[in-house]
Amino acid sequence: DSYDNSPLPFVNIMEMDADNRFISGAQTDMNGEFSMQVSAKAGTKLVFTFIGFEKQVVPVDSKKEMRIVMREESKMLADATITASRIVNDGMMNIKERNMTVAYSKIETKELEELQVASIDDALQGRIAGVDIVATSGEPGAGMSIRIRGTTSINASSDPLIVVDGIPYETTIDADFDFATADEEEYAALLNVSPADIEEIVVLKDAAATAIWGSQGANGVLQIKTKRGSIGSPKITYTFKGTGVFPQESIPTLNGDQYTTLIMEAKQNTAEAGIANVMSPVDFPEFYYDPKNPYYYYNYGQNTDWAALVQKNSFTQDHNVSLSGGGEKARYRMSLGYLDQGGTVIGQNYNRITARMNLDYYVSDKIKVLTDIAYTYGDNARNYTTTVLSSAYTKMPNMSLYEWTVDGQMMPSYFSPEETPQGAWSKVYNPVAMAEHGKQRLLSERIVPKLTMQYYIIPNQLTYQVDLAFDINNTKTNKFLPQIATGRPMYETSVNQAYDSDSKSFTVQTYNKLIYTPNLGDDHDLTAMFAFNTRDARSESMNITTANSASTSLTDPSTPSKLTGDNALGIASSSSQTRSFAGMFSLNYALKDRYIFGTTVRQEGNSKFGANYRYGIFPSISGRWRLSSEEFMGNWEFLDDLSLRASYGVNGNAVSGNYLAYSMYNTYAYQYMGMTGVSANNMELQNLRWEKVHQYNGGFKFAAFKNRINIDFDIYRKRTEDLYFKNVTIPSSSGYNSISMNVGTMDNQGWELSVLTTPLKTKKWTMEMNMNIARSVNIIRELSPYIAMESGVTTSNGNYLSVVQIGQPLGSFYGYRYAGVYLNEDETIARDANGDKIYDVDGNPVYMRFGYPTIDYQFQAGDAKYEDINKDGNINYLDIVYLGDANPLFTGGFGPTIRYNKQWTLSAYFYFRVGNEVVNKTKMDMESMYSMNNQSTSVLRRWRHEYNSPEEAPADLLPRALFGYGYNWLGSDRYVEDGSFLRWKSLTLSYNFNKEKLKALGLSDLKLHLTAQNIFVWTNYTGMDPEVSIGGSNIYLVGYDQTRAPKAKDVSLGMTIGF
C-alpha cells in the first residue's frame, strides 16, 4: 500500500502473454507476499489488481524478486462505492457489504485455524456478539449448545439453522424416532464439517436477515462458506496438529478411613433418633476392617481414589491435506482430513475422516456448474453410561479396585460384587470396570452431494440458478454391558446386555432462483430475487436389545440369548417423513450509497401442520441510512462509515412433532383373545399454529481512520407468540392424558456491541484488539392456564421447584433459603417476626418443624437451617422463593492479536458469561451425608457437637451426617451458585518462515504454531466447571451441573506446509 507501506493481502496476480491472454494466476497471502512460476517468453507481463487500487502491469524480466506498490484510485474519496464491492452472501444472493440493512456478523476462519477443535462452534465461543455457545461436556465429540439472541421456544427447537454453501444442513434429531444416540447433550451438530474446510462464517441475527430462510431460520442462522479453488497452479497444503489433553483438577473426596468414619457417624446419628438400629459388624462388615474376616478385610480395607483411576491424560492428532488450483475454465479444491481425539475419561475417544471436493466449471460464457460433495465417517467411542465420572466421585473409597483372595493375594480381575452397601446395578458399579468394559460406540457415515447450475440470461444482470442437494446420513450405535461391569448374576437382564440401533435419514432439497442485478447507473444499486424451495426429509430407525449371551465376547445382539418384550429388552422400529415448500421474494435497493432499503416476503407450507394452518406468510422490511455520505456531515476525512439501520420481520417456527395433525396408534406386546391390537396414541390436532417470532432491530455502524476503528451496535426485541408446548394435561375422560397446544408469549430483548480496533500499525508492528459484549433478557409474558407451570418435589431432599411463570425468565430456580446450621438446641426454637421465641398454650417452646402436619419432622441441633419466611415455625411450600435463573446477564469475549515483521503472531482470547446461576448438583450429592455414597472433603467441616455461639463454630460449618433421615439437603440457595466466569480460552504463538528461503526447499509456505486452550478460569463457582449446558429438551433442568466431564486443558503444536 503506497499510503503506509503496509502489506496487502488477497491481491490478484495474473500472468499475461504477449497476446494478452491470461495463462496462470496467484494471490498474495496475509503478508502481501506471493510466489509463482512464469514464462520467460518475450512480452510476458504480470497484472496486479485489487479493489479500490489502480491496476499495475509489470513486464517480466530476469528479476526473481519484485516489490509492487499499489496506489489507491484517485476517485476513492470522491466515490465511496469503490469500497462497496466486498460481498456478503445471505445464503440466497450476494449483496454488497455497504448495502446490508440487517444485523449480521462475519468472521473469517484464518484467525481460528491454529485452534485444535473438532467442531467449529467450539472455536467461535465468545467471538460473536449475541451468540451464546456453551459446551455440553468435555467428552470427545460432544456437542455445543448454541443460542442466537436467547431461547425462542419452550418445546420447539431453539437451535439456529446451519447453512453450508447455501444449503440448510440437517443438525437436529427428528422428534418422532430414536436416533439411538439417546443422550441429546452428546449430539454434536457440526462434527461433520471439518474446520479446516471452512473459509468464513456469517451469522444472521434479526428477522430481516433470517426471513428468507423461513421457519428454519426463526432462531437465527449460522452460515458456513467452505473453501473453493482459485486461479493458479496446483497447490498442496498439509496441516498437522498434535495436542496433549489434560483433565481438570478433580473434586477432593474422602479417603477410605475418612469415609468409614463418616458412615458410622451418620448411622449412629440416625440410630439415636430412633429411626434405625445401631450399625454392627454383622450387618456391615465392610466398615470394620476385621482381619478375622479376610474377604471384607482385603476387599473393603483400601483407600481407592476412583476419580483419579477413571481419568487420564490423552493425545489428539489432526491431519488435513488439500489440493487446489485452476484456470479460467475450471477451478477445484479437494481435501482429506483425519482426526483422532482422545478423551480424559477411560473408554472415550473420537475418530473422524472427512473428505470434500468443490469444483467450479465454466461450460460456456453463459453457463457455470458447481459440484460439491462432502463425506464424513465418524467413530465415537463412549462409556456405556454417562455417569462414570460422577459414580467415581461417589463410589465407596474403602472398596478395592481389584479382587483379593482370602489369603491376601490381589487378583488381576476387577472387584465387581453382586451387591455392596451402596446397592446393586444400576445404582452402583465398579467405575473402572464400567469405563473399560461397558461399551458404547456410535458409528456414522454422511454424504452430502450438491449440484448447482448458473445460467447467465443477461450477463451481469439476470441469472437463473438451480441447486439440487442431497443429505444421506446413516448412524449405527452398538452398546454392550458385560457381567464384569455390573457384577450381577448371569440370569439377570443387566448381564451381557447388547444393544444395536440403525438409523437412516435422507433429505432432498431444491432451490430455483432468478436473480436480477440491473445496471442502473452510479446512483442506483438494485438486487432482486425470486425463488422456490422444496424439502423432503425421510428417516427410519430400528433397534434391538438382548441379554444373557454365553460370553462377554459375544457382543452382537443377534447371538442366541434372552429377548423379551418388556421395557428394557426387545425390538423396535420407526419411520418419519416431513415435506415443505416455499416461495419467496427478496429485494435490496440503494440510492446514492445513502438510502438503502431491503424487504423479503416468504410463504411456506409444512406437512407438520393440519390443513387449517399449514401455510404461513413471513415478511420483513429493513433500511439503512449512511449519514457519512450526507453533505451536512461536512468533509470529515477520518470518517469511513457512519450509518443507522432498522428492521422488522416475522419468522415462523414449526412444531417439533411430524404427525400431530393425524391420529396415531401404538402397538403392544400382549394379546387379547389370541390377537394383537393397537390403541390410539394421540388426539388429532388440526389447529396447531406456527410459533411466530416478531423481531424489531435498530443499530448503527461506525468506522473511522481507514477502518482502524470499527464499532457495531444493535438493540433488539424478539417476541415469540403462540408458544408450542407438549404434554398439556387434559381430563382423562377425553381418552387421552395430554395434548400439544399453542400456549403463550415469550420475549427476548437486549443489545449487542462489537468493537474491532487497530491501535498500533507500523512497518513492522501491528496490534489488533477485538471485543464484543451482549445483553439478553428472557421473560415469559403470557401462558395458558392449562399447562403445568411447576415441576419438582419440594418435600424431599435433592429437588428444586422449577416454575414457568409469567414475568420471570425460562430456566428459573425456586427453593428454600439456606440459613446455616442449628448450632444448639436453643436455636431450633421457632421465632416470630421480632425474633422472640414462640411458645404454645401450655408455655412450652415451639420447635422448628418441616412439612407439618404431613411429614412433621422436628429440626434438631446440627440440622440444616432454612429461613422461615412467614414466621410460622413450619418450613413448607409457603417458604419457597425465587433463587435465580440460568440465563446470563452478559456474554462476550475479547482478545489482542500482535504481529511482528510479517512473520511472528501472538494472539490470545478470553470468553466470559456473567450473571447466570448454576445448580451445583454435584455439590448437593457430595455434601448430603445421607447415603453410602462417598463425599467431598468439605464434609470434614460437618457439625459433630453443639456450639454456644457462632464464634465457636468453624467457618462454613456443614450440617450433621444423617443416614437416610432428615432434611439437610433440600433444594435451596445453598447449591445455587453464581455461574459467572472469565475463561482464558486460547493463547497462540505462530511463526511464518521467509518465503524466499523456502523456495530453495521447494516449498511455498511453512508455518509453525504453539497453542494452549482452556488455560485458566476465573470464577467463584465451587464446582469443576461453571460452563453448564443451556440446551436440552427438558425446560425444567436448564443450568444443572450434573458432573459431566469438564472441558480439558490442552497444548498443541502445529505445522502448515505448502507445496
Image (cartoon, rainbow, N blue to C red):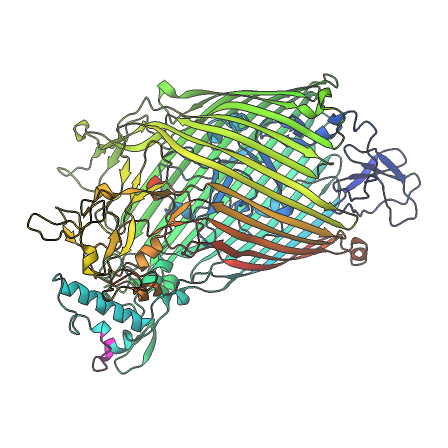
Look at 36% across and 18% down and name the residue there. Answer: 612
At which x and y percent is residue 143? 46, 47
Looking at the image, is 946 positioned above or below residue 166? below
Does the segment drawn in magenta span residue 533? Answer: no
Q: Image quadrant for the N terminus? A: top right
Query: Magenta includes 294?
Result: yes
Nearest the viewer among 912 and 347 is 912
Residue 536: % across, % down: 45, 30
Figure check: 662 above or below 440: above
Between 798 and 942, the residue placed more toward the observer is 942
- Left or right of 206? Residue 859 is left
Quadrant of the image occupied by residue 464: top right
Residue in the image at 32% along x and 35% along y? 804
* Residue 753: image location, x then y, percent: 57, 37
Whether residue 333 is visible, yes or no, is yes
Q: How far across and how far down the image is residue 688, in percent?
A: 34, 24
Number of on-image labels: 0
Quarter of the image holding residue 660?
Answer: top left
Residue 529 in view: no
The prevailing secondary structure element of the residues shown in magenta is loop
Q: Is residue 729 left or right of residue 275?
A: right
Region in magenta:
288-296
Q: Is residue 35 above or below residue 156?
A: below
Residue 75 vertical position relative to residue 936 in the rendered view, above or below:
above
- Direction top: furthest residue: 520
Q: Residue at x 58, y 40 (%)?
A: 373
